[in-house]
Amino acid sequence: MKETRSRILILAGAIFAYAFLLLPLLVVIGASLDSGAQAYFRFPPQEISLRWYVELPAKYWASLGLSFAVAFMAGALAVAVGGLAALGIARGSLRGSVALETYFRFPLQVPFVVSGIVFLQFYYLLLDNFGIKLLGSFWAYVIAHTFFCIPYAVGAVGSVMTRDLERTENAARIAGATEPRVLRRITLPALKPGLFAGFFFAFIVSFGDVPVSVFLATGAPVPLPVEIFQTLQFDFDPRVLAISTIVVILSSAFIVGMQRLIGLDLVLPGSARAL
């Protein structure tokens, strides 16, 4: 009897969790199909059509492309820097590895709004003193996003660097393998799940950023989250629901693709613990 009650409670908890996560998305998707709602949000939809998808302005597509490109580049740079940092912390001979690990996770301790203001002032200093104009450019977003994405890469790569990997590397060296061969045949394949997980976390965080990007946005295009924020700041636009639905679909496809490519069920648990 107790076992039956436990299973019912677990099932109820799982259903509640799924509903809590999925219902807001389903509401947005449903409301995006209501062609009659122009000045307000309406759900369930009463006049179903693809009107708002057809009438999506070019600025949303440009912002979506910019957000994807920035997130991809920031994720790649974060994995490159964070992966090397994780290797240095785990295998380096420097003292104070705990302090170094804390240092590389420091960007997560700073509120993103503060980071946005700091990068805004930094770009102004570059412009005033060296004539380098970065504010509002593609690389302005990439540099700022890489800053707060590095901790995710450090945590993800560090989570797969175990003692077993070190013993395997030592065994390969004893067997006569050179350092480049050990790196290519043992270390990198073992770090692959952490590298993919770090890129995945960095990409998602960068793609959805508003607090930092809003300070760096000048002119057009701007990242999609900033474009949506600026649009809804003064008035409701049902086309935002359509582009949001497209983002949900693309994000789901991205997650499924990562699952097929590397297997997130094997990557995310350890990485989440490290973060």
Image (cartoon, helix red, strand yellow):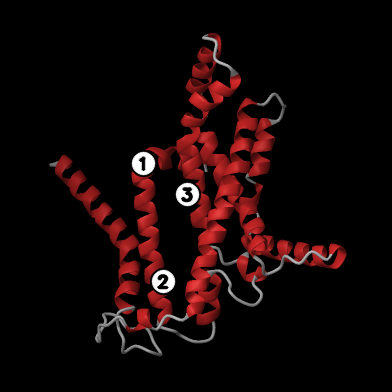
Is label 1 in contact with label 2 (beta carbons under 8 Å)?
no
Residue at 31% in and 56% down: 17
In the picture, residue 29 is in which quadrant? Answer: bottom left
Q: Position of residue 229 (x, y in %)?
A: 53, 75
In the picture, residue 227 is in which quadrant? Answer: bottom right
For disc 1, the marked residue is: 263
Q: Position of residue 221 (x, y in %)?
A: 58, 74
Left or right: residue 194 versus residue 87 is: left
Is label 2 in contact with label 3 (beta carbons under 8 Å)?
no
What label sits on residue 35 in the rendered view?
Answer: none
Q: Position of residue 228 (x, y in %)?
A: 50, 75
Q: Name which of mark 1 and mark 2 comes first in the sequence.
A: 2
For disc 3, the marked residue is: 200
In this picture, is 142 found above or below 82? below
Q: Position of residue 114 (x, y in %)?
A: 68, 62
Q: Amino acid at mark 1?
A: Gly
Extreme residue in the right direction:
129
Q: Measure the alpha-carbon separation of dots 1 and 2.
A: 26 Å
Mark 1 neighbour class, 10 Å CA radius: few under 14, some 14 to 19, many 20 or more: some
In this picture, is 96 found above or below 156? above
For disc 2, the marked residue is: 244
In the picture, residue 55 is in which quadrant? Answer: bottom left
Report helix, strand or loop for mark 3: helix
In this picture, is 227 found above or below 86? below
Q: Amino acid at mark 3?
A: Phe
In this picture, is 36 found above or below 178? below
Report helix, strand or loop for mark 1: loop
Q: Measure the alpha-carbon separation of dots 2 and 3.
A: 20 Å
Comparing 220 with 119, the one in front is 220
Q: Measure the alpha-carbon separation of dots 1 and 3.
A: 12 Å
Comparing 143 with 91, the one in front is 143
Left or right: residue 182 versus residue 24 is: right
